[in-house]
Amino acid sequence: MKKVAAFFKNASPLKLVLVGFALGLIAVFFEKPYPSIFLGLRLMGYVLFFWAIIRYFNSK
Protein backbone atom coordinates (compact mmCIF):
# COMPACT_ATOMS: atom_id res chain seq x y z
CA MET A 1 0.00 0.00 0.00
CA LYS A 2 2.91 2.34 0.68
CA LYS A 3 4.21 1.81 -2.85
CA VAL A 4 0.86 2.82 -4.34
CA ALA A 5 0.71 5.95 -2.19
CA ALA A 6 4.31 6.79 -3.09
CA PHE A 7 3.52 6.38 -6.79
CA PHE A 8 0.66 8.88 -6.67
CA LYS A 9 2.66 11.25 -4.49
CA ASN A 10 5.74 11.26 -6.74
CA ALA A 11 4.17 10.70 -10.17
CA SER A 12 4.49 13.29 -12.87
CA PRO A 13 1.34 15.07 -14.05
CA LEU A 14 1.50 13.20 -17.36
CA LYS A 15 1.41 9.83 -15.61
CA LEU A 16 -1.53 10.96 -13.48
CA VAL A 17 -3.43 12.06 -16.59
CA LEU A 18 -2.73 8.71 -18.26
CA VAL A 19 -3.90 6.77 -15.19
CA GLY A 20 -7.03 8.92 -14.98
CA PHE A 21 -7.75 8.37 -18.66
CA ALA A 22 -7.22 4.61 -18.26
CA LEU A 23 -9.68 4.52 -15.35
CA GLY A 24 -12.23 6.38 -17.43
CA LEU A 25 -11.73 3.96 -20.30
CA ILE A 26 -12.10 0.92 -18.05
CA ALA A 27 -15.24 2.44 -16.54
CA VAL A 28 -17.02 2.22 -19.89
CA PHE A 29 -17.13 -1.57 -19.62
CA PHE A 30 -18.87 -1.40 -16.23
CA GLU A 31 -21.54 1.12 -17.23
CA LYS A 32 -24.52 -1.20 -17.75
CA PRO A 33 -23.98 -4.14 -15.35
CA TYR A 34 -22.44 -2.21 -12.42
CA PRO A 35 -23.44 1.47 -12.37
CA SER A 36 -21.91 2.14 -8.94
CA ILE A 37 -18.50 0.82 -10.02
CA PHE A 38 -18.83 2.88 -13.20
CA LEU A 39 -19.47 6.06 -11.22
CA GLY A 40 -16.63 5.32 -8.79
CA LEU A 41 -14.09 4.76 -11.55
CA ARG A 42 -15.24 7.88 -13.37
CA LEU A 43 -14.94 9.90 -10.18
CA MET A 44 -11.41 8.61 -9.51
CA GLY A 45 -10.39 9.40 -13.09
CA TYR A 46 -11.83 12.90 -12.77
CA VAL A 47 -10.02 13.54 -9.49
CA LEU A 48 -6.71 12.27 -10.86
CA PHE A 49 -7.05 14.39 -13.97
CA PHE A 50 -7.64 17.59 -12.02
CA TRP A 51 -4.99 16.70 -9.45
CA ALA A 52 -2.52 16.38 -12.34
CA ILE A 53 -3.54 19.78 -13.69
CA ILE A 54 -3.08 21.39 -10.28
CA ARG A 55 0.33 19.73 -9.81
CA TYR A 56 1.41 20.84 -13.28
CA PHE A 57 0.59 24.48 -12.65
CA ASN A 58 2.09 24.42 -9.14
CA SER A 59 5.38 23.12 -10.52
CA LYS A 60 5.76 26.12 -12.85
Image (cartoon, helix red, strand yellow):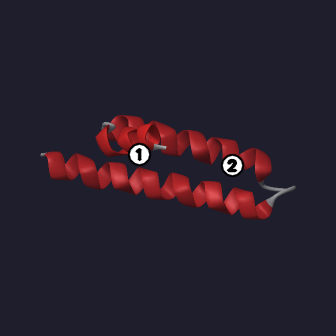
Q: Measuring 82% from the left and 58% from the top, which residue is drawn there?
A: 34
- Going by the numbered disc 1, the residue's amino acid type is Ala
Question: Which residue is under mark 2?
Answer: 27
Cβ atoms under marks 2 and 1 closer than 8 Å: no
Q: Position of residue 18 (x, y in %)?
A: 47, 37
Question: Which residue is under mark 1?
Answer: 5
C-alpha gap between disc 2 and disc 1: 22 Å
Q: Position of residue 2 (x, y in %)?
A: 42, 42
Q: Measuring 60% from the left and 56% from the top, which residue is drawn there?
A: 42
Question: How packed is label 1: few (under 14 Cα within 10 Å), some, or many (20 or more)?
Answer: few
Which numbered dot is residue 59? none
Question: How packed is label 2: few (under 14 Cα within 10 Å), some, or many (20 or more)?
Answer: many
Instruction: Please tell me which of labels 2 and 1 falls first in the chain.
Output: 1
Q: Position of residue 20 (x, y in %)?
A: 50, 45
Q: Nearer the viewer, mark 2 or mark 1?
A: 1
- Report helix, strand or loop for mark 2: helix
Q: Measuring 63% from the left and 54% from the top, which residue is drawn there?
A: 41
In the rendered image, the vertical position of residue 47 relative to residue 21, given as above or below: below
- Camera-nearest residue between 35 and 5: 5
Q: Is residue 36 left or right of residue 43?
A: right
Q: Is residue 10 left or right of residue 29?
A: left
Q: Quadrant of residue 23?
A: top right
Q: Is residue 29 left or right of residue 3?
A: right
